[in-house]
Amino acid sequence: MRVYTEQKVRQLTEVVCNCCGKKLLVENGILKEECVHVTHDFGFFGKRDGTSHTFDLCEECYEKIAAGFALPVEAREREELL
C-alpha cells in the first residue's frame, strides 16, 4: 500500500507491505527497500471483471509466496539497472 502527499507535488510518504504490514523505509519520497509493486486490471471471464487491484509486498513476503508456487519463478540476470 502506498501513501502520497496531497499537495501540488505528489510525493511518496509511506509504503506498507499488504501481506505482513511491515512499513518499508521511505526517505525524501524515495523507497529505500526492495518491494514488489503489483497493479492488475481484471478483464473478462472472472469474478473481478472491470476492477483494478494494486498491492505491495516486502521482499520477505514475496520470497515466501514465490516459494509456494507449483512452477518456479522465471529469473534472469539483468545487464543494466537503469
Image: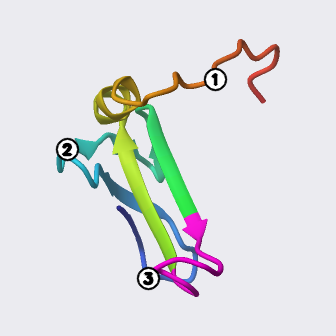
Q: Nearer the viewer, mark 2 or mark 3?
A: 2
Residue 19 vs 8, above or below: the answer is above
Q: Residue at x 63, y 23 (%)?
A: 74
Specify the amino acid type for callout 1: Glu
Single out the residue that lies furthest toward the right: 79
58, above or below 43, in the image: above
Q: Residue furthest bottom?
A: 50
Which quadrant of the view contains residue 34? top left
Residue drawn at (34%, 29%) of the image: 68
Q: Quadrant of the C terminus?
A: top right
First of labels 2, 3 by sequence position: 3
Total labels drawn: 3
Q: Is residue 69 left or right of residue 75?
A: left
Which region of the structure is painted magenta? Answer: 40-51
Q: Which residue is mark 3?
A: 6
The amino acid on which the numbered mark 2 sits, given as a three-letter code, is Lys
- The quadrant of the image that shows the N terminus is bottom left
User: Mark 3 Cα within 10 Å, few/some/many (few <14, many 20+)?
Assistant: few
Q: Is residue 73 left or right of residue 4?
A: right
Q: Residues within 10 Å of mark 2 (few under 14, many from 20)?
A: few
- Specify which label sits upstream in the sequence, 3 or 1: 3
**1 in the magenta segment:** no
Calculate the distance from the C-alpha at mark 3 to the C-alpha at mark 1.
Answer: 38 Å
Mark drawn on residue 4: none
Q: Any mark on residue 22, and which?
A: 2
Q: Assess whether mark 3 and mark 2 are in contact (beta carbons under 8 angstroms).
A: no
Residue 18 drawn above or below residue 46 = above
Q: SS class of the residue under badge 1?
A: loop
Q: Is residue 77 above or below residue 48?
A: above
Across and down, in percent, residue 52 comes to 53, 77
Disc 1: which residue: 74
**Whole-number angstrom distance, CA of label 1 to CA of label 2:** 26 Å
